[in-house]
Amino acid sequence: PAEPCYLFADTKDGNAIRSKRRGPPLESRTSNTLASLGEGLRKVSLYDKHTGKTFVDAEPYGSFIKWIVEPPLPSRYSGSIEMPSRESQMEMLELFFRENYEVLPIIPQRYFFKQLRCKGPIITPLLLNAIYAQTSRYLDTSKYPDLPKPEVFFHRAKRLLDDFLDGPRISTVVALCYMSLYEPSPSTHRSGSPFCRSWIYSGMAYRMCLELGLHNQTNISKDLTREEIELRKRVFWSCYCLDKVQSGGWERPWMISKKFALVDIPVGLPDDDADEKLIIEN
């Protein structure tokens, strides 16, 4: 049988994996809030006697917006980062792009597998678990008898989500969109509204999308490649479309207004294959 593939651990040693999952001590929300407030007060001058202006250090509204490269992955995780065999992972990913990708074409297939080969910052355990929760139910269990059930992958994604909320990432926005589309097994009992969790996850995706400034392309880092810029356009417009579809279907107000959309419509890239270009054009 194929050995488990730990894509996000430096070793297969169990103690090392548990240590990586433990995570650093967390400060309280109150202490973080007070620290941020103190830093803000230190930077802002209420009155400058030389110029007669107030708040001389205050920056214009929205000046934080800039498209930049993805930050490094977390050093530790609070949830499981154990993955199934490499063979089963590759089959689930290929199945995802063959059957599910057209519904919400966010990360181009060629770019995704390019990132996977070099372990790029877009590939996170959160994103992979969100994808596997969608596709694992379609795999032949006789061929992969040890493959976890979709609920297991979804539960792992839920546990890992908190590790990715303090710093906004493109990959986290994508993972949250996929988590909002997850449909549990009919035999799984969940109390409350069947749409509440999905609505909350997609709302988090839209908030992080706006936090990243993906609605405004006027300030783009020179470090971004053409592929990375195009990816950000796709992420924004995927969030925009998903927002309208879910809001209309669930009779809820949408979150992203078109008047804030200062970003071009996605286009195909020169290296895209015919199928990719057809999906984007449609």
Image (cartoon, rainbow, N blue to C red):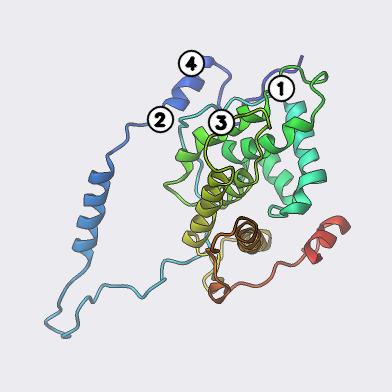
Q: Dividing the picture into quarters, in which one does residue 92 lie? A: top right
The location of residue 128, given as percent across then percent down, is 64, 37
Residue 156 marker:
3
Residue at the spot of label 1: 147
Residue at the spot of label 4: 15
The location of residue 142, given as percent across then percent down, is 82, 18
Residue type at numbered disc 3: Arg
- In the image, 264 versus 45, the foreground residue is 264
Which type of secondary structure does the marked residue at label 3 adopt?
Answer: helix
Residue type at numbered disc 2: Gly
Residue at horizontal 73 percent and vertical 44 percent from the top:
113
Q: Quadrant of the C terminus?
A: bottom right
Q: Nearer the viewer, mark 1 or mark 2?
A: 1
Q: Nearer the viewer, mark 2 or mark 3?
A: 3
**For the residues bearing labels 1 and 2, Cβ distance under 8 angstroms:** no
The location of residue 101, given as percent across then percent down, is 76, 49
